[in-house]
Image (tube, helix red, strand yellow):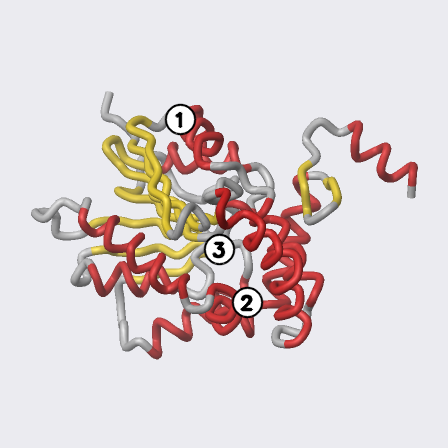
Amino acid sequence: MKKKTKNVKKNPESVWFGKERVTPDKKTALVDGVFSSVAKNYDIMNDLMSIGMHRIWKNIFVSDICASMNASAKKIKVLDLAGGTADIAIKLYGMSMAKAAVTVCDINEQMLEYGKAKVVNSGILSGIDFVLGNAEKLRFEDCSFDYVVISFGIRNVARIDTALSDIFRVLKPGGQFFCLEFSSGVDPKFKYGYDLYCDVVLPFLGTHVAKDREAYEYLAKSIQSFPNQESFAKRISKAGFSDVKWKNLFSGIAVEHYGIKKCK
């Protein structure tokens, strides 16, 4: 065990997966495994874990995206990264009055299958496509999308800065990036209760509802270790984005980040 820990520490690229340091490639594989395990219960677990608040946060997020859309544009191409079970895609399609043509991209095949089923059950016959892919190595040409959005997914990416750079690449000049994510920069008044919830309640729900304690221990740690608002904003700027800003939701438990790819 000591030898393994020593080897990981020697790797300057090692990243956190729960309580341990692993290589980025191993984290990618482990995250894929986590979501294969939780896919079946993902939606109900989101409701339980957030006491339904994730629906409010996502509605605000999608409303802000749609409010920024060009009213005169006939179709707006949106890439929904880590789109999983298509919550954001379905909301975007509806709130934009079918103006948004959404491509859902996720690394996990099981999550995409649930997303496809939800789209069919929603009665949407066209306008939402699905692609299996890694946010670090997007399979799209330069300047392909008007928007790239990601909701509660960026913290699961092994090489976040690589993903941000590739997001910048696939956006058209003038294209906009919206990110909704949990944050470690929670209002201090809520910090103790927030950490207690992550350390105790989430693993409990994982054990007794999703039947996978380890997966939800990882998800809890990924929430607690994600950069605060200012730190993440700096990384978005470093990737090339301009007008970078953020908006706290529910005292910073969830945060909406924004950046634009300025026309040269």
Residue 234 rendering spot, x and y as whole percentages: 44, 27
Residue 182 rendering spot, x and y as whole percentages: 48, 49
Q: Are marks 1 and 2 in contact (CB under 8 Å)?
A: no
Left/right of residue 254 with respect to residue 126 in the rendered view: right
For the residues labelled 3 and 1, the Cα–Cα distance comes to 24 Å
In the rendered image, the vertical position of residue 37 relative to residue 3, given as above or below: below
Tag 3 secondary structure: strand
Which of the image's four quarters has the N terminus?
top right
Q: Which residue lies furthest to the front in this view?
A: 189
Tag 2 secondary structure: helix
Q: Residue furthest left?
A: 72
For the residues labelled 2 and 3, the Cα–Cα distance comes to 10 Å
- Count every numbered label the image shows and give the total: 3
Left/right of residue 212 with respect to residue 134 in the rendered view: right
Which of the image's four quarters has the C terminus?
top left
Report which quarter residue 122 is drawn in: bottom left
First in residue order: circle 1 vs circle 2: 2
First in residue order: circle 3 vs circle 1: 3
Instruction: Name the residue nearer the viewer: 200 or 46.
Output: 200
Amino acid beneath label 3? Asp
For the residues labelled 1 and 2, the Cα–Cα distance comes to 33 Å
Residue drawn at 75 percent across, 29 percent down: 11
Give residue 237's mark.
1
Counting other residues with Cα less than 10 Å from the Cα at mark 1, is it few (<14), some (14-19), or many (20 or more)?
some
Residue drawn at 79 percent across, 31 percent down: 9
Q: Which dot, 3 or 1, sits closer to the camera?
A: 1
In the rendered image, the vertical position of residue 177 relative to residue 211, given as above or below: above
In the rendered image, the vertical position of residue 149 relative to residue 122, given as above or below: above
Amino acid beneath label 2? Gln
Q: Which residue lies furthest to the right in this view?
A: 2
Residue 204 rendering spot, x and y as whole percentages: 66, 69
**Residue at label 3?**
106
